Amino acid sequence: MSGQKTWGGRFTGGTDRQVEAFTESISFDRRLYRHDILASQAHARMLGEVGLLTPAEAERVAAALDEIGAEIDAGKMTFSISLEDIHTHIERGLIDRLGDLGRKLHTGRSRNDQVVTDLKLWVRDAIDDLDGLLLDLQRAFVESADREQGVVIPGYTHLQRAQPVLAAHYFLAYVEKLQRDRDRLADCRKRVNVLPLGAAALAGTSLPIDRESVRQKLGFESIARNSLDVSSDRDFALEFVFCLSLIATHLSGWAEEWVIWSTTEFNFLDLPDAFCTGSSIMPHKKNPDVLELTRGKSGRVIGALQHLFVLVKGLPLAYNRDLQEDKHAIFDAFDTVAGCLSVAAPLVRQTKLRRESIASRIEDGFLDSTTLMEWFIARELPMRTAHELVGKLVRECEQRKCRLVELPDEAFEAASPGGGADVRAVLGVANAIAAFRSYGSTAPAEVERQVREWGERVSG
Ligand code: ARG
């Protein structure tokens, strides 16, 4: 079979079958075929422009590549490990169709710059897909913020009741995280969008190729300056999978929160039946499997990032075959995150807050104590003194088994003579919420403005 190989001349014997099976990548890099064809068409047309092919030859190559693309689309291409990877399969298809003309396509190029060009084109599309999925999830959270306006929920630190927050404020917190995820991907895209093709094997080429023409055809923003660097540069892949890891981490934290919030103990959420499953033995169960799997799958994505770090650490310049192993991590991390985002958006849309259950316990847990402390501070008590004072009031409440608002006026008199009646204006959760005023806080006017602004930003 050595005649089938792209390196046939140097070898007399064929490749060991086990080695073929060990070294092949066609089983997973076939996924790059569309991008490989696009890059090859740009390359061929450039060869036609600089005289390494005639313009007519270049068009014949481009047309044959379209045919090969259609053959793969239709599932008609036979893949074989003896042809190793997607690049060789497509080149072989071209040679089968065009003979010697097909044998010219690889002029001024190597699989080393080819594979990283394909991968960058693929990642660029993946980033654009992810942006759409993230936007849709943002919309779902903004819709929830809009629907639940006015609803107050407990805010937690250490998973202990801390201060009250508007539900809309809570939903918008996730919109912010997702916006950072989108911004990060957009930033990563800049480094993805640098053309490697033309680096050839590692040193460039003595042939008169025109990289600027290829850049334009493939829509890259700029051209990699150093062939030695770019032929093995996978920084963009690590960055991309880092972005994915952070998205997965955001989703995992959210999923954990909603798993807890949907328990009988919390009873904050009504998860849609369509996104839960039952138990094969316990008839009453409604399990939050989608959320649990979202939490669990984050491990795969973070694992993919470790995979890539260990893969590239210690690789000398330039291409080393180790790099073939990058694709498993990139593809799996993308598929996993895209899958999680796709189910997250409808799940958020169909989940309702259990308003009555939340309201029935909203006055528990001294959510108004910090606002009370601030009330004393505003009346010129030193912060530490006010903190201690309210701490003592909370202790008194615990002894009396009552809420702050239920303490008699005298309890507040010591600290603020004559203020015992006024103080009630900040006690209780509704009053506490109304007292907030800082930028970015849960102050009703602030949150209302942000719901409006986000609504405009994510619409259309
Ligand atoms: N299948 C290879 C990969 O994914 C393509 C590049 C092969 N280059 C080489 N010199 N063997 O990395």
Image: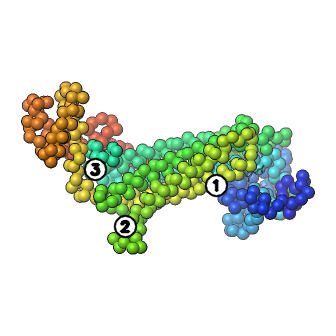
User: Residue at 31% of width from left, 50% of height from top?
Assistant: 167
Marks 2 and 3 close (CB-CB < 8 Å): no
Q: Residues within 10 Å of mark 2 (few under 14, many from 20)?
A: some
Query: Label 1 belongs to which residue?
Result: 328
Residue type for callout 1: His
Q: CA distance from mark 2 to mark 3?
A: 24 Å
Residue 409 is situated, as x and y percent measured from the top left of the image, at 8, 38
Residue type for callout 3: Ile
Relative horizontal placement of residue 144, taking residue 364 as reference (left or right): right
From the viewer's perspective, is the residue at label 1 or at label 3 nearer? 1
Q: Residues within 10 Å of mark 1 (few under 14, many from 20)?
A: some
Marks 1 and 3 close (CB-CB < 8 Å): no
User: Against 264, is 446 above or below?
Assistant: above
**Res. 91 image quadrant:** bottom right
Query: Label 3 belongs to which residue?
Result: 153
Residue 286: image tag: 2
Residue 359 is situated, as x and y percent measured from the top left of the image, at 23, 54
Residue 143 is situated, as x and y percent measured from the top left of the image, at 37, 54
Residue 307 is situated, as x and y percent measured from the top left of the image, at 61, 49
| Nearer to the camera, 21 or 86 | 21
- Quarter containing the N terminus: bottom right
The local secondary structure at tag 2 comes to: loop
